[in-house]
Each structure stands twice: as structure tokens, then as C-alpha cells.
Amino acid sequence: MSETPVDADEVRHVADLARIDLDDEEVDQFAGQFADILSYFDALDDVPEVDPEADLVNVMRADEVRDGLTQEEALKNAPATEDGYFEGPSVS
């Protein structure tokens, strides 16, 4: 367990921010799980720092600006478009 316990009020606050309704049993369960998660972060403090490897090289290509698709090219295979945009199903 973490040295910083997570209390029920903190769990309820996070649940309110996420717009999730929790009953008292779930609040207690999540408080324990949050405390466990924080203890895992505490364990990272015990990991020793190492010097970066001097011979590591970036194997990725260099970032470079290139032209993207035109609006017509991007929309040419779309099943439906409207006013130059992708048309999707209505979400209610």
C-alpha cells in the first residue's frame, strides 16, 4: 500500500469529475486500488538512474514537411460527404 492513502472523498471527487455514480462498496474498492496504484509509482523512486547509451542512434526518418492530401483526394473514397466534409451517422 502507498504511504499516501486514498480516502473515500477523493474517490467520490474523481468519480464526480468522470460523471460516474459509485456506491459505497465501489468507493471502498477503488480507494484500495488507487492506493495500490500509487504504491507502484512509489516503487519507481527505487529504480536507479542510468547514464544514456552514447552509441544509440535515431533509426526513424527525419521529420520533414510534406504536402498532404487535397480535400478532394481525402473525400474521394468516402461513402458519403456533405459540403466538403465526411458525412457520418447521427449520434444522439
Image (cartoon, rainbow, N blue to C red):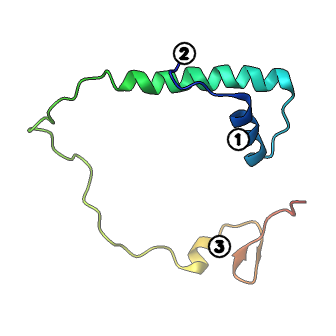
How far from the left and from the top, in percent, is residue 35? 59, 23
Nearer the observer, 20 or 75: 20
Residues at marks 1 and 2, CA–CA distance in whole angstroms:
20 Å
Q: Is residue 60 above or below residue 3?
A: below
Which quadrant of the structure image shows residue 54? top left
Quarter of the image where one finds residue 57:
top left
Place of residue 56 in the rendered image (x, y in percent of width and height, measured from the top left): 15, 39
Closer to the N terminus: mark 1 or mark 2? 2
Q: Amino acid at mark 3?
A: Leu
Q: Which residue is mark 3?
A: 75
**Looking at the picture, which amino acid does disc 1 mark?**
Val
Q: CA distance from mark 2 to mark 3?
A: 53 Å
The quadrant in which the C terminus is found is bottom right
How far across and down, in percent of the image, does residue 15 sit?
Answer: 76, 40
Callout in the foreground (3, 1): 1
Residue highlighted by disc 2:
1
Residue 12 to residue 92: above or below:
above
Residue at 69% across, 81% down: 84
| Spatial CA span between label 3 and label 1 | 41 Å
